Amino acid sequence: MARAFCYAFPALSALLLAAPVMAAAQKGPVPLTVKAIYGGEPLTGTLPSGIEWSPDGKTLSYIDDGELVGASIATGTRAVLVDRAKLATLTETGGTEQDRDHRERYGMASYLWAPDSRHLLFDSDGRYWLFDLKTGTGVETGSSDQASGDDPSFSPSGQSIAFIRQHGLFVVQPGEPATTDSPIAVAPAPNQTTLNGEVSWIYAEELEARSNYAWSPDSSHIAYLQTNEAAVPEYPLTDWIPTHAKNVMQRYPQPGDNNPEVRVGVVNADGGSTHWIKLPIEKGQDYIPRFGWVDRRTLWIETLSRDQKRRTIYFAGPGDGRDPVEMLTVTDGKFLDDNYDVWAGGGTIVLTSWKDGHNHVYLYSYDAGNPLGGKASEPKQLTSGDWDVDKVLRVDAAKKTIFYTSNETALLDRQIWQVSFNGKRKALTTLAGTHEGDVAPDGAAFVDTYSTRMEPPRLSLCKAGGDCTRLWTSRSLAAYGLHAPLQLEMKTKDGTILYATLMLPEGARDAKSVPVILNPYGGATGQTVLNRWGDNVWGDKLLFDTLLAEHGFAVLRTDNRGTPGRGRDFTQAAYRDFGAVQLEDQLTMLDYALAKFPQLDPRRLGWWGWSWGGTFTLYAMTHSGRFAAGVSVAPVTDWRDYDSVYTERYLGLPAQNPDIYKADSVVASAAHLKGHLLLVHGTGDDNVHIENTVQFIDQLIDAGIPYDLQIFPRKTHEILGGTARVELFNRILAHFEQYLKPE
């Protein structure tokens, strides 16, 4: 019979009560606690957010310690643009747990620069404030309707602001009084299942679309994506906190379901009828990840086939009566890299592709005087080698320069580079570690967010020539006596090199028996073994691993085949396989570590993970008897329960690949669970629905297997909030203390 988890951990209570006493008695490094790491502001301080460049190229702005700060690009000097008290009123956020989660997860901007570089637009829970930097005053503009407030955008002329309200596209003049009648309904939504310019959940989460409309360069028209979700199944997100529980229905296509029907239309900025572009795509199946304007008369539109093996760029002239022109097509026999960004204009098209085996930058040309005159030229490959371009940051067509990040100099590092259209390249950063860039519109400067495995982030404003001004530095963690994990590297039988880190407890080399906790992510969109602070999945890696080490645990993290950043073949190991190949690599590295460090105890092994990593935990515990304890946070337990875009990219359609879905479903293997399991899920998770955990528990009950369960009411996939995260990570620590430590 299944047993629910309650705080039946005397060892944990004693541990938590004793911690302050131990800290007071000890000399030397300050011991870490879960509350210190997760209970308030990060120990490193809060990294500035809201990084934006003024349109005139003179100022970099960012939010630091509750103030909006402006840094001069010419001199690096800083000044407060909006003080703390005023900024709080202009950017206050409320809403639901999902609203807060989406703003953080999808990086929704809280303010915008006006094209004149003298005004800012602030979004305060859907109320827009036009702020005059010279006078320091704000005027509410647009609509005070609670339904407004999504994705505002200035027209290039600065004379209009577009935004989404009630699933439709509206336009308002800056400075107009805030009345519900003032906006122009340019493309109102005809019903609740049609989104005009609004980004649907599936497009935001899996295609990383952040806006689904675009102003023409002359501000006369707006192109927008219409999304019809009528045929997409609904999932109920239930809030059980009120006396009368409430449901919010989410449109969520699962593998094999109808996808949203999408099409691109162009409408006059003053309203009127929409001209629809006739694209050769299958309705309710294929995707339109990106689109924009080539020039004031021509659109570019990117389409992606449902199986994600074909990506095509079309040019179209709205209203000219001609069919769209297929400019270029990229294909793959398994699946394409999931970077959908495109830059088109001025006679060039820039995108990345891994068709030569690694992700690189390609340049296509077309006749700028006659964009619809024919296909683009054969591509010119601007980067090449056994390394991957991580991300294109900006394309400056006027200066014929492309800025990007890559791991060319070291596999576990990321550096910022620039390459000209003639293929000449230059490294803009060289210091070992991870550099994340944000390049100014004119390419004259960039923001460098730099960190290493042992150095928390620091923010610098750099000129393209190399001179940098430090804008922000993390707080010192010297008091905690942090030490670096060991870097492990090994070659598998087939010659594949695997990389891992191993955090050992102090004095572990002299210990006789050290329990080991594996904590990989393992999925196709995340790496955990990088030379950076935190990781690409869930941050605070070093701090929590250090805490586990202080409690006597070793922590092993491995990036298995199927993860990104190692070329096409390494990532495509996940094609039709979400379990076996990944587990093989993890166990191979584990055995290597056990042989290299005999003090590690093979009888006291644990595993924990989140999201794909949570699924991986369950897969390991149902396909191997080696793990005594595991913690699975927000897992997908049956891939038929997850969304269509992500799942079908790797596993295909369920009707065509039923055996693959069954083999990779941990619900199907739940009866084989070995070890003590703690399941964790938020009831408001709109990414990995709680039905996954419920279905897995149902099978555990049928098999008579006990389990522990932690539910977080209303919490989403991130389980945000200091109180919740302290509870979560204390539970993780307690679980391993209970089951991996000696009696």
Image (cartoon, rainbow, N blue to C red):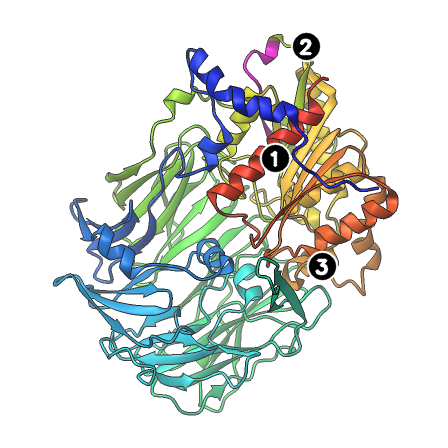
Q: Position of residue 355 (x, y in %)?
A: 59, 55
Residue 716 drawn above or below residue 169: above
* Residue range corresponding to the magenta coloring: 499-509
Mark pair 1, 3: CA separation:
26 Å
* Residue that carries the numbered disc 2 in the rendered image: 512
Mark pair 1, 2: CA separation:
27 Å
Which class describes the residues within 10 Å of circle 1: few (<14), some (14-19), or many (20+)? some
Left or right of 345: which side holds 87? Answer: left
- Residue 221 shows in the view: yes
Looking at the image, tell me whether mark 1 or mark 3 is earlier in sequence order.
3
Which class describes the residues within 10 Å of circle 3: few (<14), some (14-19), or many (20+)? many
Q: Is residue 503 magenta?
A: yes
* Residue that carries the numbered disc 3 in the rendered image: 641
Q: Nearer the viewer, mark 1 or mark 3?
A: 1
**Residue occupying image coordinates x 38% and y 74%:** 163
Residue extending furthest left? 135
Q: Amino acid at mark 3?
A: Asp
**Residue occupying image coordinates x 26% and y 53%:** 61
Local secondary structure at mark 3: helix
| CB-based contact (under 8 Å), mark 1 and mark 2 | no
Local secondary structure at mark 1: helix
Looking at the image, tell me whether mark 1 or mark 2 is earlier in sequence order.
2
